[in-house]
Image (spheres, rainbow, N blue to C red):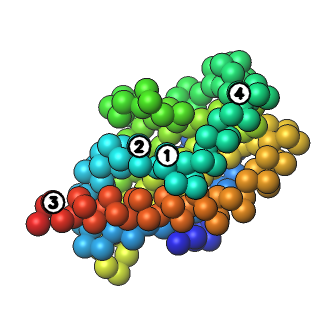
Amino acid sequence: MRLPTSAHSAQPWRIHEIARDFDTEDVWQFRTPGAGPDDFPAFLAALQAEKASESSGISGVLFKIRWKLGEIFGWDEESAGTGTRVGSLRDRLPADLRDTPTPDDSDSPLTSLYVLDNEYAAEIANGTMHGVMHLGWVPDDTGYHLQMAVLVKPNGRLGRLYMALIKPFRYLIVYPAMTRNWERTWQTLAAARR
């Protein structure tokens, strides 16, 4: 379910001190019925183990098209990424976040920045934008739910145009597919714990 930007900005996330100059592009909620305050690390690990399922269906086709376009136009070349076109947000991390162990992301286009008991952030940079995927564990009336925020800093006019063009695809295809996958992952994890 899509949420207003304030659902992210009102939370005391550590990402706020690191990515102040990024715009909040999207905020999305994933239902995790029965989740408790200590379930975030296990759910994050389950999501990381399920990455392969996100590359299927229409959403998977869209990602394949995106990677092909990136190859053709050079958006994903090393010179367009972190450490070259833009500095990594790792350079902005305070010592306590820099020292947190992060998951193995060698098979992901995202590079993990930090992991806490209720928060995770990873970054990506290419020729169109510098982005952050932020996951947070938020208390609600039924326990806790997962909240994802996508923070971006577009790369000039091309980046702003690119973000505008992919917006309908994110809202109509990518996020609904991600919601189904991630909520199913939670259900599987919750069932295994019973």
- Read off the residue under disc 4: 71
**What crowding class fits label 1: few (fewer than 14 Cα within 10 Å), some (14-19), or many (20 or more)?**
few
At 88% from the left edge and 42% from the top edge, which residue is drawn?
Answer: 157
Q: Distance between the residues labelled 4 and 2?
A: 21 Å
164 displayed left or right of 97: right
Q: Where is residue 31 drawn, in percent x and y?
A: 39, 70
Q: How far apart are marks 1 and 2 (CA)?
A: 6 Å
Q: Distance between the residues labelled 4 and 1?
A: 18 Å
Q: Residue type at mark 1: give it.
A: Ser
Answer yes or no: is residue 139 visible.
yes
163 displayed left or right of 174: right
At 58% from the left edge and 55% from the top edge, which residue is drawn?
Answer: 58
- Read off the residue under disc 1: 55
Q: Residue type at mark 4: give it.
A: Glu
- Read off the residue under disc 2: 52
- Tag 1's secondary structure? helix
- Tag 3's secondary structure? helix
**What crowding class fits label 3: few (fewer than 14 Cα within 10 Å), some (14-19), or many (20 or more)?**
few
**What crowding class fits label 4: few (fewer than 14 Cα within 10 Å), some (14-19), or many (20 or more)?**
few
At 68% from the left edge and 59% from the top edge, which residue is drawn?
Answer: 169
Q: Where is residue 184 drawn, in percent x and y?
A: 34, 63
N-terminal of the two: label 3 or label 4?
Answer: 4
- Read off the residue under disc 3: 192
Instruction: Give the numbered dot on residue 98.
Output: none
N-terminal of the two: label 2 or label 3?
Answer: 2
Q: Which of 127 and 150 is in front in this view?
A: 127
Task: Tell me whether circle 4 and circle 1 mark residues in contact (CB < 8 Å).
Answer: no
174 displayed left or right of 105: right
Name the quadrant containing residue 88.
top right
Q: Nearer the viewer, residue 24 or 2?
A: 2
